[in-house]
Amino acid sequence: MRTIKTLICFFIVLVSSGVNCAELLVLLNEKKHNSDSAASEQSFQMELGELLAERTHRVAKFVMRPRKRLANALEMNEADILCGYLPEWLPGNLDWSVGFVDVGDLLVTTLRVPAPANIEDIAGLTIGTAMGFTYPEVEKILGNKFVRDDGPGAEANLRKLAAGRFNYAIISMATLNYHLRVNDLHLSIHPPLTISKFKSQCALAKNGTLRVSEVNKVISDIQHDGSLDKLLKKYNYH
């Protein structure tokens, strides 16, 4: 619905003013290993981008880049904004908004074994992890007793968990919430143990069309008028 409204706005402005609409170049992660949960996350980011564009009187245009080129794309002004990250995940010469979307990692445990009371309880046990990802909180606690079983992504690890390949996996909050909502994997798990929780931010190109102050104002507005909460509930981020 928001896309239709944005297009209508685009044509009204174009016809009435005879000038081009300003574009907001929204950067998205071009994922090689796509999955239903990854597609849901990307849909969320696209709707968020459209909302930010609408509130800043622009039309969203999406730019896809591989994970390793995201920071460079912003630094080279190939895009204006990328949301869903933290500065430590995306080092570079970038500006950052305030944090506003809760994200984090959870330890998911199958009912085949007792629920761990803390991270120390799984020392030396195999844990499903995502290839290329680091888990500093777990590494700090377990050290060389952190036994990883790397898979291509969180969805693959949940399937392995359900199939009995291992009893523990580290999964993002958004991914677990998605699969519990659609119940496609029929997971039998204990209430997850929170490993880390934080608020993700938007990275901005320093020479882009948006300033941090503009984005922070929009974030405050959509928090107070309920637009953000409605979007989060739609994608089960609560």
Image (tube, rainbow, N blue to C red):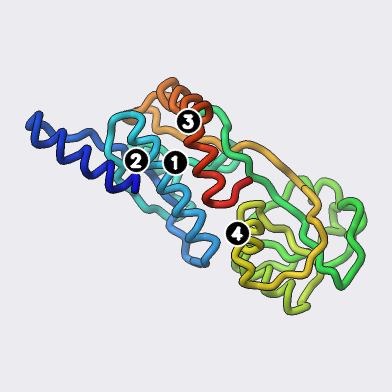
In the rendered structure, find residue 178 and report the number of the disc placed on it: 4
Residue located at (23% from left, 33% from top)? 22
Q: CA distance from mark 4 to mark 1?
A: 22 Å
The tag earlier along the polypeptide, 3 or 4, is 4
Residue at 61% in and 53% down:
174
Labels 4 and 2 touching (C-beta < 8 A):
no
Type of amino acid under label 4: Tyr
On the image, the x and y values in percent for residue 148 come to 76, 64
Task: Please state which amino acid type lies under the numbered disc 2.
Answer: Ala
Q: Quadrant of the C terminus?
A: top right
**Proximity of marks 3 and 4: CB atoms separated by less than 8 Å:** no
Vertical relation: 199 (above or below) 190: above
Q: Residue tagged by mark 2?
A: 79
Image coordinates for residue 57, horizontal then vertical, percent: 29, 30
Q: Is residue 155 left or right of residue 123?
A: left
In the image, residue 109 lies at what x, y percent? Answer: 81, 63
Q: Which residue is mark 1?
A: 82
